[in-house]
Image (cartoon, rainbow, N blue to C red):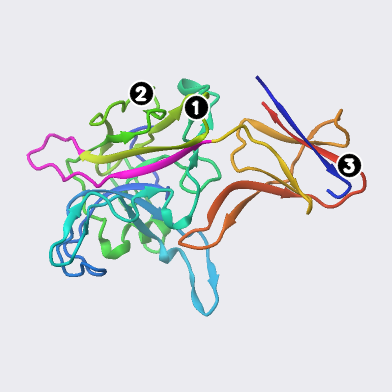
Amino acid sequence: MKRNLILSLAAAVSFGATLSQAQLITFYVGQDGLATLASGTYKGLPNPNAGRLSFLYAHAYLGVTERVNQPPITLFNNHYHSIGIYTYTGPVEAPVTVPTNANFRIPEASTGQLPLTLVAETNGLFAGKLVNKKTVENYSDPRIRSVHDILPHITATATNQFGYGSAEYVMFYSSGGRWTNRLDGVVVAMELVEKSPELRVGTASQLEALVHPGDRVTMGNGNSFEFTPVVWAEPTTAPGTYELKFKLVDVSGGPSPLLESGIVTFWYRVVPEPELTVAKTVTVMMPAITDGYVLEEAPTVEGPWTAVTTAPTIETLTGGHSAAQTGNKFITQPGEPGSKFYRLRKL
């Protein structure tokens, strides 16, 4: 049932395709080429993640960030964050290898960001479902690619022109080239480890691809692929936080398959229908995700209602590697005599 939400403001208001061009997205798959740990508590010990498939978050800087009494941050600071890799725990003299690390999940814990919002889908196979999709939230782009899709190269089927000095080049060779090992003959698959019962995992052409722990879905050939998992829930799912855990495995069937990755965790949330709040400072606040709704204003509750053209601002908190998003966005309006009404109208 469609629902119009009205507030009064008084007085003051593809799956597996070969890429002909690359661009930095959020998530990549690579192989860990670091043999010995170079820093931290276990410095000097063999890297327990060496040679393994690894799930990476590309921390990319698109512009120049000025800092007080420090050099500015530029694209030359681009680097990967390894998510869910094999690491050590316990005393240095008797370390234990575990398939996870402190940076085990998305959104990254260091940012304080809320879980990713599942959004109502209106088209295609998942119409009517709540799905993971690219929104204004950090980390929300669900696409996953091979790191080698940002390596400058020319083949019979693909040409990438991203050379020295480009954001892609810097990202690929970051961390001393730790993630540059080729993935010849590797076929990458996603294997379900665990999930909340409310979550389903499909693909662009399959409603449910990962149902039980151990189920696998092929992502593509190691050196060039793009895969988009579709994580979804029924629209009747209760508001709350839900969890998906998976790992990457080599299903090529070769004599020496690559070692599997550590366990990667994604946190998602189902939120109630969006509601407006209006602050005394004439700030109209709403959830960051209002896909499927249009914000409208009117001089009276009877109308006429017109769409608000002011672009909302995402509310963030500072700190950590990235600005953590609060899950809200807002618009501010100049003060005017009389009253003004706002509503979110469901499309």
Q: Residue furthest right?
A: 337
User: Quick check: is 257 in the magenta stretch?
Assistant: yes
Q: Secondary structure at mark 1?
A: loop
Location of residue 199 in the rendering, given as x and y in whole percent from the top left corner: 40, 30
Closer to the observer: label 2 or label 1?
A: 1
Q: Main secondary structure of the magenta part?
A: loop
Location of residue 277 in the rendering, given as x and y in whole percent from the top left corner: 72, 43
Is mark 2 in CB contact (under 8 Å) with mark 3?
Answer: no
- According to the picture, the residue beneath numbered tag 1 turns out to be 237
Is mark 1 in CB contact (under 8 Å) with mark 3?
Answer: no
Task: Give the CA distance from mark 2 to mark 1.
Answer: 17 Å
Q: Quadrant of the C terminus?
A: top right
Say whether residue 30 is left or right of residue 312: left
Query: The magenta stretch spans which residues?
Result: 250-270
Task: Give the CA distance from mark 2 to mark 3.
Answer: 49 Å
Say whether residue 310 is left or right of residue 274: right
Upstream in sequence: badge 1 or badge 3: 1
- According to the picture, the residue beneath numbered tag 3 turns out to be 339
Q: Secondary structure at mark 2?
A: loop
Q: Residue at x 40, y 61 (%)?
A: 78
Say whether residue 177 is left or right of residue 302: left
Q: Tell me the kind of residue under disc 3.
A: Ser
